[in-house]
Image (tube, grey):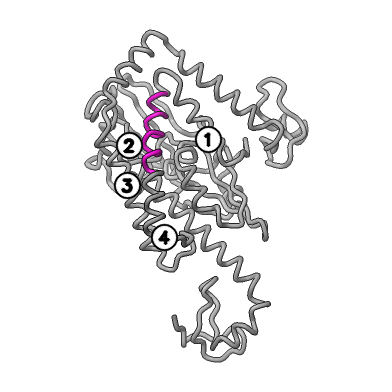
Amino acid sequence: MQHPWDSCGNCGGPALVLCVGCQVQVYCGKECQISNMEVHSTVCEGLELERAVARTADTIQKAYFAFREPLFDKSIVKVEERDHKLVLYLDNGEGGRKKGWFVDLPNHLIQNQGVADAILCFLMGREPLAYLLNLIRYLTDDMAVKVEEVQVRLKDIPRNMTVIYADGVQRSIHPDNPHFLLRLTSRESKKTWAIDITGAQFGLTQHLWPWEEYLNKHIETVEIISELNMSCTLLRTSSFLQGAPSLDFGIPFAAIDRVDLAIKRWEETELDKRVFVYVENFSAAQESLIQTIKDATRTFVDQSDYSKEVQEAIEYEQKNPNASRKELEQLHLAIYRSHLEPQNKHCSSCGELATMKCSQCRVHVYCNAKCQRAH
């Protein structure tokens, strides 16, 4: 690639050679590039990592939508856009279902892509972190970054969402629900980013942020910082419970197992041992990967029928009111405890290293009594 309109980063002359690493710095020739290598190497590595992080965030976001839409399961009959609020009206859950579970996204009720994205993210917290775990690892394994899951409480959101059920009960997603992020930290520069996969439900359309900027603008409280696989452990274990959890979590995990196999075949066929986030023709490779995810998910839906399982879950919930909910709460609490002992002890209030644990819930941890009182 030639950039004759730029000046050489070493001598200032007309540039013809582009650094293949950062793809930003240009030189007049190989001699100047080699001469400037020691000066440029640190900057180059940083720019290369930033590009890889941006590609990773964009790919995860697109992969989530490609996976979520075919598996959509909310029976929405009306959508209203109000001032800083999106209102969804749901029916009793039976209308329009295919094979006992799946529902077409109500495109005839959706006015723009922002609303569609918000609906696909509706009430999705840690689910993308769980279902896309293998993809996230695949994208980040060759990057010099530490990857964490962060549970937060949000503030100053551009838009809230409210659901109105068939019986008239209303529920808003904020401030009742926690929100979940990926946090990537460079092992060299310590620069940190937030990847927000489901922020669209709050009107947060930007999916990659410098961590400090996201923290200052939209995080009220950092509640829990955990290793990457916590969400997957929690939700996959939950999928083995009887009743609603067996469907809510079991179906997406059955689908993603198919998708992961398809991604593995795609990688072996398309990449030929190249690292995805660093490939030269990234846009084409990304488009091919996303299409692979979409096709594998749609094939799973076409080949599945959950009518029997749905009926069994309904009967279980009717015979055992609130049983699965209580079991789910107990399971989540136990897994939270196991992930906080003896590691991942970050203050639930400020995010610093924790030195004490709440004696009542045994989940939240704090760096001092002041943070505990504030939280």
Label 3 CA crowd tier, 10 Å (few <14, some 14–19, many 20+): many
Q: Are marks 1 and 2 in contact (CB under 8 Å)?
A: no
Instruction: State the image coordinates of residue 175 (x, y, percent, origin top left).
Output: 51, 33
What residue appears at the point 38 percent right and 50 percent down from the top-left corner? 265
Q: Which mark is residue 71?
A: 2
Q: Secondary structure at mark 4?
A: helix
Q: Which mark is residue 231?
A: 1
As for residue 299 lying within the magenta part, the answer is no
Q: Which mark is residue 271?
A: 4
| Mark 1 vs mark 2, CA separation in Å | 19 Å
Q: Amino acid at mark 4?
A: Leu
Give the number of the mark in front: 2 or 3.
3
Q: Secondary structure at mark 3?
A: helix
Q: Secondary structure at mark 1?
A: helix
Label 1 CA crowd tier, 10 Å (few <14, some 14–19, many 20+): many
Question: Could you tell which of marks 1 and 2 lies nearer the N-terminus?
Answer: 2
Residue 132 position by quadrant = top left
Instruction: State the image coordinates of residue 151 (x, y, percent, origin top left).
Output: 57, 37
Instruction: State the image coordinates of residue 117 (x, y, percent, origin top left).
Output: 36, 45
**Which of 124 and 169 lies nearest the eye of the viewer?**
124
